Image (cartoon, rainbow, N blue to C red):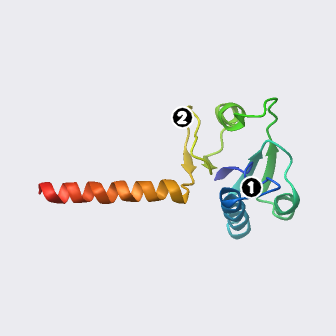
């Protein structure tokens, strides 16, 4: 299976929570899973550890998707790539997904996961009160 991963956040020089989360997910998937092929999509050439990761593992390929604007790379360029040459699955680490339909995974951050869990607990309480 070909798994595409949005590596643009993990490729940043100054990483924060989401960027480190993306970096470690990518690193561990590529190193541990030799049955699938990975395409790392980014707006700039991969740096340091990510570049080395793709050089050292034959199941990893870098794909730089050039975009002339400062913003909307995910919605514009990455979405266009998913229409023209989609992988089997796309793994994205941000809360914005393309409006185009394709198979994908969305990495939930703690904030969204907390909100989802609170909603499910509230829904369960309301459901239990009715029955």
Q: Which residue appears farthest toward the bottom when viewing the image?
A: 32
The local secondary structure at tag 2 comes to loop
Q: Position of residue 118 (x, y in %)?
A: 37, 58
The residue lying toward the viewer, choosing from 11 and 90, is 11
Q: Position of residue 12 (x, y in %)?
A: 79, 53
116 left or right of 35?
Answer: left
The residue lying toward the viewer, choosing from 101 and 8, is 8
The residue lying toward the viewer, choosing from 98 and 131, is 131
The local secondary structure at tag 1 comes to loop
How busy is the neighbourhood of tag 2: few (under 14 within 10 Å), some, or many (20 plus)?
A: few
Q: Quadrant of residue 28?
A: bottom right
Q: CA distance from mark 1 to mark 2?
A: 24 Å
Q: Marks 2 and 1: in contact by CB < 8 Å?
A: no
Q: Position of residue 8 (x, y in %)?
A: 75, 48
User: Which dot marks residue 101?
Assistant: 2
43 left or right of 4?
Answer: right
23 left or right of 62?
Answer: left
The residue under the point 87% across, 55% down is 47
The residue under the point 74% across, 55% down is 10
Q: Position of residue 39 (x, y in %)?
A: 74, 50
Q: Does label 1 or label 2 sit earlier along the sequence? A: 1
The residue under the point 86% across, 65% down is 56
Q: Which residue is mark 1?
A: 10
The residue under the point 55% across, 50% down is 105
How busy is the neighbourhood of tag 1: few (under 14 within 10 Å), some, or many (20 plus)?
A: many
- Compared to 48, does 72 lie above or below? above
Location of the C terminus by quadrant is bottom left
The residue lying toward the viewer, choosing from 85 and 113, is 113
């Amino acid at each position: 299976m070909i798994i595409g991963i949005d590596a643009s956040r993990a490729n940043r020089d100054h990483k924060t929570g989401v960027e480190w989360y993306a970096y470690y997910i990518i690193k561990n998937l590529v190193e541990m899973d030799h049955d699938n092929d990975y395409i790392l999509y980014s707006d700039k050439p991969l740096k340091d550890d990510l570049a080395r990761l793709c050089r050292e593992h034959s199941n990893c390929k870098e794909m730089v998707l050039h975009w002339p604007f400062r913003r909307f790379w995910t919605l514009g360029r990455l979405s266009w790539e998913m229409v023209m040459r989609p992988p089997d699955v796309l793994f994205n680490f941000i809360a914005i997904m393309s409006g185009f339909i394709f198979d994908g995974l969305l990495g939930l951050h703690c904030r969204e996961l907390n909100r989802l869990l609170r909603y499910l607990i509230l829904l369960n309480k309301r459901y239990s009160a009715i029955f």
